[in-house]
Image (cartoon, rainbow, N blue to C red):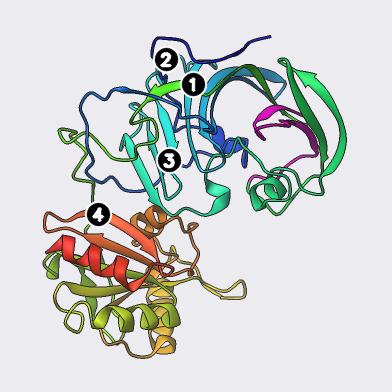
Amino acid sequence: MDVRRPAATTMRIVRLPAGRPARWCPLLCALAAGVVVAGCGGQVQPTVAEEGSDLVRARYTVTVVEDGQSHRQEYEVIADGDRRLRFAFVGGGEGDRDQRRGSWTVWDGHVLITYDPASEPAYNRIEEPEAGQRPTFVLVEGSADFVRACPDARRLRTHALLGRTAVRYACGASSGQDPPMEAHEMSLDQETGLLLEQAGGSVSVVATEVELDPTVAADTFATGLPADSDESTGAKVDEVRLPRVGGGELALADYPAPLVIVAGDPAGIRKMVNRLAALTNGGVQPRVIGMLIVIPSPDWEGSLLDAKDAASFAEEASKAAGTFPVPVAVDIKGAAAYQITQAAGVDAGQTSPTSIGFVSSNRTLVGATTDAVTDDELRQRISSLR
């Protein structure tokens, strides 16, 4: 048994990978996608959990069986109830020990950020990601996170794990998730809702120690970057040249930054452009442009590898879309808008929700969101671009 109260010294926070944990979604869902924004850095003092805090620290062993081979990895999780979470890769996994050292993922309730020194870019950030994209280790029975983690849940019994009373559940399979979830069982700490064990199928997750009310660093759930980070300026926006709705071409280089780029289907772009009009002097300060994401239907006869077929499809999509109050490009399969849709948390190849990207004067993507954003939030983002 290893259930401890905080020690006198500050715990060392190790970091978690931005690599493959998506195989274990929704319990271990880390998305290495997004855009970097400037944050604060420097040394921070340790923070002791206040009385009644939901802070908990846990260590886990995760075993994945793939192609007959068993791969074992160690993780550390710091959770503030089901509101905020940080998890860190500790070690294990063939070839991962050195490559993934120093990696971490943080969810602060609004922003999901990952850091992996072996990736390019090393930092990835998503604002307001969909629930299935963020990591979850504390589950409240009946909540949406619980239902995703344990479809068709059936309570089995209570039992003892690490000196804690755990509630065991049988969970059904779910083909509606990506990747599909296998039938499994899981045990949650009765007091905190913390995952203590998951077993079944090709993945097992076992808590090896739990610490209640730990002493943690003040920036444990921070989602900003150190001011001196080489990547604090964000990801450079790719230069593109695409067919333009109404004829001709739209080249990103022809539009001086800062820019607001709206990506989605015709109705979504029009609605968002109308919202932006009052905030951008009719779409010119800063400049607003659109990227119309179009997907060939299953019965479309043609090949996008053929330049003539692709041009014909773009022309058809342009005519069907009608007119817009701002310049709009035809973006087949969302290939050009991928940086923005990915940063906004929209699945690749999806035309909705509508994504909005904010490009600074040095042509870096400094933020992205969806049409769920409020007008006040849009106003703040646009003001920061000027």
Sequence-wise first label, 3 or 4: 3
Mark 3 touches mark 4? (CB < 8 Å): no
Mark 2 touches mark 1? (CB < 8 Å): yes
Residue 11: assigned label:
2
Mark 2 touches mark 4? (CB < 8 Å): no
Residue 365: assigned label:
4
Sequence-wise first label, 1 or 4: 1
The Cα–Cα distance between marks 3 and 2, rounded to whole angstroms, is 26 Å
Residue that label 1 marks:
214
Q: Amino acid at mark 2?
A: Met
Q: Secondary structure at mark 3?
A: loop
**Which quarter of the picture shows residue 294?**
bottom left
Q: Amino acid at mark 1?
A: Pro
The quarter of the rendered structure image containing the C terminus is bottom left
Sequence-wise first label, 1 or 3: 3
Residue 212 lies, in percent from the top left, at 57, 22
* Marks 2, 4: nearer the viewer: 2
Sequence-wise first label, 2 or 1: 2
Residue that label 3 marks:
32
Residue 105 lies, in percent from the top left, at 43, 34
Q: Is residue 200 among what the camera can see? A: no
